[in-house]
Each structure stands twice: as C-alpha cells, then as structure tokens.
Image (cartoon, rainbow, N blue to C red):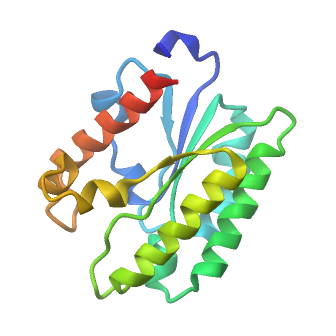
Amino acid sequence: MRPEAFSRPIVLVGDEWIAGLDVVRYLPAWPVLNKGLPGADLGALSARLFQDALRLFPDLVVLCAGAHDLRKGRTEEAITGDLEAIIGRLLGASRPIRTWLCAVPPLPASWSPPERVRALNRRLQGLAEAYGLVFLDLHKLWADPKGALREAYRGDPISPAAYRVWGELLEAHLRAL
C-alpha cells in the first residue's frame, strides 16, 4: 500500500520499542501516531487503549508489548490472555481495527530467561494466527547472526540504528499490504 491509501491513522501501541521510534524520521510519509510508553506493561496499555487507539478509529494498530510483563514474572498464559483481551477490543470495535502483533525481542537474562521469551513468542504467533493478524517477528531478526536488527541493537538503551532497522521493517510491511 502507499501512504495515501490510509484514510485513518496508523497507531503504534506498546513499550519502548514503540515509544522510541521516531516516526517523523523513520516513517515520514505514513500517517503514524506513536502512542508508545517506555516501561509499559499490558495493564497500562489496556487502561489506555481507548484513549490511545480506539477513539481514533485507526486503519491499523501495531501492538508491541509483553517484555515488561515477563520482567515482572507474569506467566506466558497470563500475558497471552491480556493480549488476547486487547486484540478482542480492537477487532470488536464498531469498525474492526486491523491489528499487527509483534514478538518480544530477546531480553536481558535478568529480565527473563531466553526459553521463557521463546515460549511467549510461540504463544503470540499462535494468537496472531488464530485471529488472522500479521505477526512481526522481532525475535527472529535477532536470531539471525547476520540480521540487520541484531547488528544494530546494542542493548539498553535501544540504539538509534536499531530504531532505524525497526522503522524499515514496519515500512516494508506497510508497503506489502
């Protein structure tokens, strides 16, 4: 799709992987509103869903969350359940909102063991498939030792180069619509 094909905004909702993405710099042609909140868990995102997304009647919501829930020790089942409730609200809106779901990228071991991140991402991919959502597998981009995102990501804080690659990934998926 071309940017002008969107009659309503594209809304980004999530934690710092969303919040830090400078949409003016990396997605300048697209009607994107960045509603990311650094450090946000699913409870915070759910509480703000109407204000940040539903009331705007967007053409698309890109949802990237779950890392901070893992960090807090929440189970994969609980995280998936919260995301499913958010997805249900988006798809059940008076005008169903196209939704894309992001994988959780690799996290510091102090946040969550890698096997828990992989287990959650398998559940998220299943959730995306069950609801017919586009699944943006950020984790897979890191798994590729030569992947651009792995090369660009240098830890916490997230580097500008990683946001550039993330913006390019989003734009490629938008153009492929």
Could you say which is closer to the camera, residue 28 or residue 83?
A: 83
Residue 151, compared with residue 41, is above or below; it is: above
Q: Position of residue 70 (x, y in %)?
A: 48, 80
Q: Residue at image x 27%, y 79%?
A: 108
Mark yes or no: residue 96 visible. yes
**Number of dots carrying numbers:** 0
Residue 59 shown left or right of residue 162 in the figure: right
Q: Position of residue 17 (x, y in %)?
A: 37, 55
Residue 16 shown left or right of residue 77 in the figure: left
Direction right: furthest residue: 94
Could you say which is closer to the camera, residue 35 or residue 69?
A: 69
Q: Residue at image x 51%, y 68%?
A: 122
Could you say which is closer to the camera, residue 72 or residue 50?
A: 72
Direction top: furthest residue: 4
Q: Position of residue 68 (x, y in %)?
A: 46, 74
Quarter of the rendering containing residue 38: bottom left
Quarter of the rendering containing residue 88: bottom right
Q: Position of residue 14 (x, y in %)?
A: 50, 56
Residue 168 shown left or right of residue 116 in the figure: left
Residue 123, compared with residue 167, is above or below; it is: below
Quarter of the rendering containing residue 56: top right
Mark yes or no: residue 22 visible. no
Residue 145, compared with residue 52, is above or below; it is: below
Q: Residue at image x 35%, y 22%?
A: 28
Q: Residue at image x 28%, y 53%?
A: 141
